[in-house]
Image: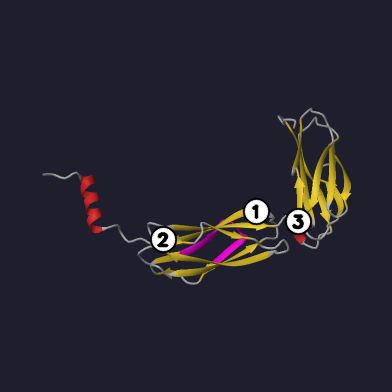
Amino acid sequence: MSCNPSLRSLLLALVLGSPAAAELATPQPIIELRPKASDETFSTEFVFENRGSKPVKVLEIQSTCSCLSASLDKAVYQPGEKGKGKADFSLSSFSGRFEKTLHMRTDDPAQPEWVVTFAIEVPELITIKPKTQEWSIDGPAEAKVTKVTINGDEPITITSLSSTREAMQYTLKEVVPGREYEVTMKPRSTAEVMLGAIKIQTNSSIRRYRSQMAFFSVLRGVQSP
């Protein structure tokens, strides 16, 4: 009696068992990190394990961002063996929450690439809402207010404003000294497309917060709030 090829493959798999495989994994799918607002660089160690049944070799480490580099304590990990890695971040231009990943190329066909994901949350000492003010082409050239809030322990003073476009007028109001400000923007005209930003200079002791941007645009099809 002939045997169906698919059935024969299934029976062989049941008799012989599954092929040996490696599986590198961290205890959590995402590694959460919380550096201080003043940190321009940040380093962390992470642990992982070969949960598979055969050795695995890490051939290459690649990062999705020039702001992240990494190394492992060695290249080959035996079944059940734990390893350590080190990740170094450059945070000079980041604030808020963002994700970065490492991609490890291995010699295991079942797991040719192992991805390690980091979620980094850098405290936002300055929040700007809305981040972008919008006007519609040929719409009312009305004034709109952007709120700037200081969230850290120390007060921060806005020392100056400037615009990347002469056609955008602006004023600054100090609502609570060192804590709350209002930037009012008003286009001279909405007849033409315009994209730009108000540059906000501060006296923050932390370099990344000394210069902030509040954006603006005049575009077609913008819906009024």
Mark 1 and mark 2 in contact (Cβ < 8 Å)? no
Q: Which residue appears at 65% of the width and 61% of the height?
A: 34
Q: CA distance from mark 2 to mark 1?
A: 29 Å
Amino acid type assigned to the residue bearing label 2 in the image: Glu
Classed neighbour count for the residue bearing mark 1: other residues with Cα under 10 Å, few (<14), some (14–19), many (≥20)? few
Per the image, is 146 magenta? Answer: no
Q: Main secondary structure of the magenta part?
A: strand
Q: Position of residue 53 (x, y in %)?
A: 35, 64
Q: Position of residue 215 (x, y in %)?
A: 76, 43
Where's the N terminus, which quadrant? top left
Q: Position of residue 155 (x, y in %)?
A: 83, 58
Amino acid type assigned to the residue bearing label 3 in the image: Leu
Labelled disc at residue 125: 3
Q: Which residue appears at 80% of the width and 29% of the height?
A: 191
In the picture of the structure, the residue carrying the numbered disc 1 is 97
Q: Position of residue 219 (x, y in %)?
A: 73, 33
In the picture of the structure, the residue carrying the numbered disc 2 is 23
Q: Which residue appears at 48% of the width and 65% of the height?
A: 48
Q: Secondary structure at mark 3?
A: loop
Q: Which residues are magenta?
A: 58-70
Classed neighbour count for the residue bearing mark 3: other residues with Cα under 10 Å, few (<14), some (14–19), many (≥20)? many
Q: Secondary structure at mark 2?
A: loop
Q: CA distance from mark 3 to mark 1?
A: 13 Å
Per the image, is 62 magenta? Answer: yes
Depth check, front residue: 165 or 150: 150
Q: CA distance from mark 3 to mark 2?
A: 40 Å
Q: Is residue 93 left or right of residue 57?
A: right
Where's the C terminus, which quadrant? top right
